[in-house]
Amino acid sequence: KFDKRLWEEELIASKAYARALTRANILTKVELHKIINALDQIAVEFRRGKFAFKSDDEDIHTAIERRLVEKIGAIGKKIHSGRSRNEQVVTDERLYILKENKELTALITSLQTEICEIASRTIDDIVPSFTHLQQAQLIRLGHYFMSLFFMLENDKGRLIDQQKRLDILPLGSGAVAGSTIKIDREELRRDLGFSAISQNSIQAIGDRDFIAEFLFATAQTMVHLSRFAEDVILWSSTEFGYFELDDAYATGSSMMPQKKNPDSMELIRGKTSRAISDLNTILILQKGLPLSYSKDLQEDKEPLFDSIDTLKASLQICAGVVRTIRIRKDNLLRNVDESIYATDIANYLVKQGIPFREAHQLVGKLILRSISSRKRLSEFKLDDLKKISNKFDTDYFNIFSPEKSVEAHDVIGGTARKRVEDEISNALRLLNDYRHSHESI
């Protein structure tokens, strides 16, 4: 029911194994030719949706072998010489994840491209940032979007990095002790395109760490998408009003005609729980098993396939949201409280020679006086300010400028315009490097 989507990998591995059996003098060249032709015909049946599973097919391996025998008779039974389903399944899974990994990293790259474009468009839009869901400091909106870019860059890096532990040939390991046929595993490795060969037959057929590591990478990517989704949900609400989702990514209410619900983002946030559960499932599945193969491991496929499907759909939806989202610029600074400049005021005092801890306390007093007097920070008279610190001067009133506030953060990774431009340039360079390296593969 579940492992049938491994049909292509099973056929690829079976053809390579048939060639290995021929090199080991188990198959003749004529028999190999018949097997390869029959496997190619079976591939056509799968592509056309014509392959008929039978009730006694235990899995994709037995289904394909059964069909092979139907086509060419007893010769087809030779394909299983020295081979176990224990090694077949992990070979198929590794090939499958390697293939899906490429698609996932490509989808992440597509989303990152959309992020760079919207970051460039919003580099001059200033918005409050939030910590603890409280207004913190002013930032460029493009800087905000780029934070998601670099989270996804880490996610993509994890997917790419784990390939070196994934790209290992287990075929030839037999059921547990290694094949009894003198299979040339090095030639088999080259045939299937793996980078390395497993060094221990027990580990090769009994371990699912490569799936667990892959599912951590997919789950962490979903967590990042979920956190972005939470911001979009909040920022598209009436209370914030920063964003408006395109109609394609929002729905109405069956009862309340005024509603425009961010359902696409809510679903990504909700589906993240599935990705986390998939990772949890594969870890719990293994925890009580002996080191070698047990039938429990058959349950590894549902979480694997579900996690891939969930992440693929979420990346595509997220890219569409970023590409079409409307920025309601008039609302970005609408509800900003002047206390957002508190750190700027503290830094102003630091530049006058006051230690930061003392400056922090002085600004705290200023905030309390602002609250008790119901005055905005910019409405104090200079005489009032000097009662708190004689370091205040007329240039204090220049602090209350959104542009000056963001430009003060002029360090690598900061929100000054030049630094955000550098972020975007570096990001585009990373995308180009990725595309060039993968085009050459």
Image: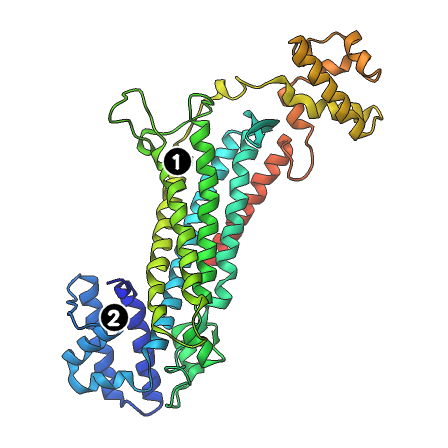
Question: For mark 1, does the 10 Å Cα neighbourhood hold few (<14), some (14 to 19), or many (20 or more) residues?
Answer: many
- Residue 258 vertical position relative to residue 201 in the rendered view, above or below: above
Q: Position of residue 60 (x, y in %)?
A: 25, 70
- Dividing the picture into quarters, in which one does residue 134 lie? top right
Residue, far front? 288
Q: Disc 2 marks which residue?
A: 59
Q: Nearer the viewer, mark 1 or mark 2?
A: 2
Q: Residue furthest bottom?
A: 25
Image quarter of residue 361: top right
Q: Residues within 10 Å of mark 2 (few under 14, many from 20)?
A: some
**Where the C terminus falls, by quadrant?**
bottom left
User: Of the residues under marks 1 and 2, which one precedes in the sequence?
Assistant: 2
Say what amino acid the circle numbered 2 marks.
Asp
In this picture, residue 411 sits left or right of residue 55: right
* Residue 321: mark in rendering: 1
* Residue 234 x/y as whole percent: 45, 29
Which residue appears at 28% of the width and 65% of the height? 3
From where the camera sits, is residue 437 visible?
Answer: no
Pick whichever, 278 or 105, lies toward us.
278
The amino acid type, in three-letter code, at marker 1 is Val
Q: Above or below — where is 274 with respect to 180?
A: above
**On screen, residue 353 above or below 151:** above
Q: Residue 73 bears which disc, if any? A: none
Give left or right: position of 192 versus 51: right
Alpha carbon distance from label 1 to label 2: 39 Å
Asked whether the viewer can see residue 281, the reply is: yes
Residue 107 location in percent, x, y?
41, 49
Q: How is the image coloured?
A: rainbow
Name the image quarter holding the N terminus.
Answer: bottom left
